[in-house]
């Protein structure tokens, strides 16, 4: 069967540093008190800037995007669609908290997952930045109680399960 | 002496898997070329390649032509029947191995940027066109191109001490760096229709031949960078008349290519150490942008004892410079940038170059070359001898974010720093990326902290590597992995080795001892070709500390650090003094939980039989069990009489003993840094060497003795060891707010 490639040909020059390190790290922790999973996701600011510029076809200042409604609602829905937690086949509900850019050229996103049916056994599906960088790797650390388990998601394998006994 | 107790973990499965096993199997046997101390041996040799080149840059067609004469000297004991050269530009030939060796799926190109890059790459006719290869007399000689390499077949073996001179004429199409990428190429400025060329890997270059690899025979696939022999260069570069050229080495014909005024400014800059002097001003550069002259001019550069040559050329260049004074020769720190780099580049670039030389020199040796140049090329950071191409561009309106500023300064420090590793301490980048990137990133961190207090360094401090090291081990490789097989390049080849060295310096060896050994390594291998073993051995030999366990854990495995405090028990000496001990007994009994029956019986049983009838009470049943009897006092006196004076003294002080149980959950063995916090609010730090784990790699207990009473124990409180889990580092346990908690708090 022939598949049709959908192409969006844009004419925006790539402005990011052509660096070789496409890694994002999500630190997840089960919050017993609020019965939710709290997440902070760290990525290279340049990579995310590239995504924003390709999406909006304009130059972007990451330090001010969160003050712009259009951009921040895009970011929220981008994260919601590209970072999904399910438990017992039921997607957990995503709650966006905010983002910050640091001097170390990193960008941090903060969000939580509520209504996680069984927090000891979850599936994480992350395609964060996969559309833009084929070498992107998304490392996920999940801490439940005193234990931490880690998985790494890559474009060829973007879903993984973490289980605690 | 009686030997008892054999290590249990170390000999399981009948082979020695101990984390403290010496590195004899991993490191090559020392020999006459490289000795056991990690220094060049008595018969160490290296080859020499000298170049005379005439280069023409065609600004109309964006092509480059070269006539190159190479004189190769064989200093090895081996007769050579052929010579190998690098043709790194061939990675841009359609269907090069570098392109074919990369996997791709349809998803990879279903976004516009990757798609465009791929189409551009496929269409671009890159790679060397070899016009002719002749001997010194001009007779054609046999050669073969094999991918990114070229073999010259010699009619007669080149023996030890012999020289061979030959010529190559070549040309190639220069790539648009901004569209198809690359470490070199051009950037086109639409607004004023000018090109900015950063030219490197641009001529056929001799491969390294040495005692370790023979001929360097790894094709260029794109990640593993370069390794080249040292030699002298004489290069004439012909460009449009209104271009300014920056190159490796010293400009020989300033009077021919610079105006009188510019020559004056150049003289002035050579005496200026505080403020960079403009040799080509912004006004002159803006004027040149418009002229578009077609006549040409030749810039003549010479460089001695370098492993490569690179240059940049453009109408758009502004050029500033100042002097850096050293104990040996002075150096000119210089920058070349288009007006688009202002106001960042004029303010910082040359000053950062100067700072880099000062910092790096402290840890290695005086910078041995006459110039150090930083050229602004957007979106990149790439190093060559004496010259590097660096990104960091302000917005079009001249504003810039903090990130752009720090990104620019860091990349300049990093790329200028590469002059030391690998340009001078000439390790093989195609084999071991970490040997230059790791060591350089480590010094970059030290330099950044000297530039500005609490500079936001991305790599170096131990806690910044934790997220990487505790990740899924299927996606991590040891540092000792060939450059082309590394996963997570940045963390693996830059971040982790830089962190390891920082830990070695701060925690394992201490600053003075580390700095001494590191400097020894730098000086031993200055203008030579070291291997990993030479580095490991020198660091041990010069510091006087066996570090095999450290190299094994940090460089040969993907283990991470996770040490925890599992239990703390408090003991005091039994004083035998009934007044003290009985009171203590009373106190602890009161603290002990009573069981439910006892509690109920106190209520329910109004009177027991012996309470009714005291006759039943003999000497063992007394009204107050905590009462001090005369008999007990007498016993205590007898005990004291039997003690020596020393023992009496110890009793008087009243020592507290704490047994702390540690567990190594991560696998990587590290020293245990434990801090005791006393009830009088003072603290004491105790460091147990990593060897505490040598008999049992999972568990270790240790008893500590203090006069004071301990109220808390903390493990690695100053984040020195890259410990991945902090919740188990405190006794009693402490909840540490996560980055998530802090962010949420600040929002509320
Ligand atoms: Zn580098």
Image (cartoon, coloured by chain):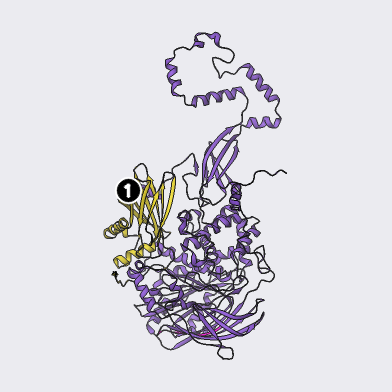
Chain colours: A yellow, B purple
Residue B529, x across and y down, in percent: 60, 70
Residue B77, x across and y down, in percent: 67, 76
Asked whether residue B380 is in view, the answer is: yes
- Which element is circle 1 on? loop
Front residue of B529/B417: it is: B529
Where residue B142 sits, quadrant-wise, is: bottom right
Return the residue found at the far right.
B1
Magenta highlight on residue A49: no
Where residue B402 sits, quadrant-wise, is: bottom left
Overall secondary structure of the magenta stretch?
strand
Residue B84, x across and y down, in percent: 56, 79
The residue tagged 1 is A88
Tell me if residue A135 comes above or below residue B193 in the rendering.
above
Can you say which quadrant of the picture contains the N terminus of chain B?
Answer: top right
Judging from the image, mark 1 belongs to the subunit labelled A
Residue B506, x across and y down, in percent: 56, 54
Return the residue found at the far front.
A1
Left or right: where B662 falls relative to B318: right
State which region is magenta: B52-61
Asked whether residue B66 is in view, the answer is: no
Q: Residue at x 28, y 70 (%)?
A: A4
Mark 1 closeness class: few <14, some 14–19, many ≥20 residues within 10 Å? few
């Amino acid at each position: 069967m022939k598949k049709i490639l959908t192409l969006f040909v844009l004419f925006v020059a790539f402005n990011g540093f052509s660096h070789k390190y496409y890694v994002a790290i999500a630190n997840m922790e089960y919050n017993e008190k609020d019965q939710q999973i709290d997440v902070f996701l760290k990525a290279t600011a340049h990579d995310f800037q590239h995504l924003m510029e390709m999406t909006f076809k304009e130059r972007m200042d990451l330090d001010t995007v969160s003050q712009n409604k259009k951009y921040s609602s895009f970011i929220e829905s981008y994260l919601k669609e590209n970072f999904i937690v399910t438990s017992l086949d039921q997607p957990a509900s995503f709650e966006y908290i905010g983002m910050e850019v640091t001097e170390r050229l990193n960008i941090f996103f903060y969000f939580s997952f509520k209504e996680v049916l069984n927090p000891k056994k979850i599936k994480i599906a992350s395609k964060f930045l996969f559309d833009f960088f084929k070498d992107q790797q998304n490392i996920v650390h999940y801490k439940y109680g005193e234990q931490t388990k880690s998985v790494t998601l890559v474009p060829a394998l973007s879903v993984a399960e973490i289980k605690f006994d | 002496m009686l030997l008892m107790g054999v290590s249990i973990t170390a000999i399981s499965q009948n082979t020695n898997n101990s984390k403290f096993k010496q590195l004899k199997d991993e490191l090559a046997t020392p020999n006459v070329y490289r000795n056991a101390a990690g220094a060049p041996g008595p018969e160490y040799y290296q080859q020499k390649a000298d170049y005379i080149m005439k280069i023409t840059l065609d600004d109309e067609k964006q092509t480059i032509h070269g006539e190159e004469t190479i004189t190769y000297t064989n200093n090895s004991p081996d007769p050579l029947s052929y010579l190998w050269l690098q043709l790194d530009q061939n990675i841009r030939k359609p269907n090069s191995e570098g392109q074919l060796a990369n996997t791709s799926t349809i998803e990879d190109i279903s976004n516009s940027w990757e798609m465009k890059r791929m189409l551009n790459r496929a269409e671009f006719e890159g790679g060397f066109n070899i016009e002719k290869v002749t001997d010194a007399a001009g007779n054609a000689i046999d050669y073969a191109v094999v991918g990114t390499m070229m073999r010259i077949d010699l009619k007669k073996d080149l023996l030890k001490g012999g020289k061979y001179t030959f010529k190559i004429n070549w040309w190639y199409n220069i790539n648009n760096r901004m569209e198809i990428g690359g470490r070199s190429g051009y950037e086109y400025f639409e607004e004023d229709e000018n090109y900015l060329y950063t030219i490197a890997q641009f001529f056929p270059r001799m491969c390294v031949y040495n005692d370790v690899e023979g001929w360097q025979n790894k094709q260029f696939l794109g990640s593993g960078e370069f390794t080249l022999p040292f030699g002298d260069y004489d290069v004439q570069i012909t460009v449009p008349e209104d271009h300014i050229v920056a190159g490796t080495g010293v400009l020989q014909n300033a009077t021919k290519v610079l105006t009188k005024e510019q020559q004056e400014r150049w003289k002035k800059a050579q005496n200026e150490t505080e403020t960079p002097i403009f040799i080509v001003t912004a006004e002159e550069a803006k004027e040149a942008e418009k002229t578009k002259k077609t006549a040409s001019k030749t810039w003549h550069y010479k460089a001695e004892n370098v492993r490569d040559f690179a240059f940049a050329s453009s109408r758009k260049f502004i050029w500033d410079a100042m002097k850096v004074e050293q104990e040996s020769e002075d150096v000119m720190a210089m920058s070349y940038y288009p007006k688009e780099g202002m106001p960042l580049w004029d303010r910082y670039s040359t000053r950062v170059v100067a700072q880099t030389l000062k910092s790096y020199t402290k840890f290695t040796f005086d910078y041995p070359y006459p110039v150090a140049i930083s050229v602004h090329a957007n979106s990149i950071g790439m190093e060559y001898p004496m010259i590097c191409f660096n990104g960091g561009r302000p917005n079009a309106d001249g504003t810039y974010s903090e990130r752009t500023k720090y990104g620019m300064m860091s990349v300049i420090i990093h790329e200028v720093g590469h002059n030391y590793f690998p340009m001078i301490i000439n390790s093989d980048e195609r084999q071991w990326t970490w040997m230059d990137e790791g060591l350089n990133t480590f010094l970059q961190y030290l330099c950044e902290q000297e530039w500005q207090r609490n500079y936001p360094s991305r790599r170096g401090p131990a806690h910044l590597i934790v997220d990487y090291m505790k990740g899924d081990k299927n996606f991590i490789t040891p540092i000792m992995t060939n450059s082309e097989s590394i996963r997570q390049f940045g963390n693996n080849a830059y971040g982790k080795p830089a962190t390891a060295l920082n830990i070695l310096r701060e925690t394992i060896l201490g600053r003075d001892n580390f700095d001494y050994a590191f400097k020894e390594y730098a000086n031993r291998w200055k203008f030579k070709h070291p291997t990993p073993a030479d580095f490991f051995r020198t660091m041990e030999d010069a510091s006087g500390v066996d570090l095999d366990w450290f190299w094994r854990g940090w460089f040969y495995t993907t283990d991470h650090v996770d040490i925890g405090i599992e239990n703390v028990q408090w003991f005091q000496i039994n004083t035998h003094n009934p007044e003290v001990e009985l009171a203590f007994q009373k106190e602890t009994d009161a603290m002990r939980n009573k069981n439910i029956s006892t509690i109920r019986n106190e209520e329910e049983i109004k009177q027991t039989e012996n309470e009714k009838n005291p006759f039943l009470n003999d000497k063992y049943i007394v009204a107050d069990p905590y009462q001090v009897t005369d008999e007990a006092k007498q016993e205590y006196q007898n005990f004291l009489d039997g003690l020596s004076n020393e023992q009496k003294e110890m009793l008087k002080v009243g020592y507290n003993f704490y047994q702390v149980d540690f567990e190594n959950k991560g696998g990587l063995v590290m020293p245990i840094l434990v801090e005791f916090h006393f009830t009088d609010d003072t603290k004491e730090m105790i460091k147990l060497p990593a060897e505490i784990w040598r008999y049992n790699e999972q568990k270790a207990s240790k008893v500590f003795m203090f006069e004071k009473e301990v109220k808390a124990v903390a493990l690695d409180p100053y984040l020195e060891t890259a410990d991945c889990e902090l919740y188990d580092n405190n006794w009693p346990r402490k909840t540490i707010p996560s980055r998530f908690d802090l962010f949420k708090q600040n929002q509320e």
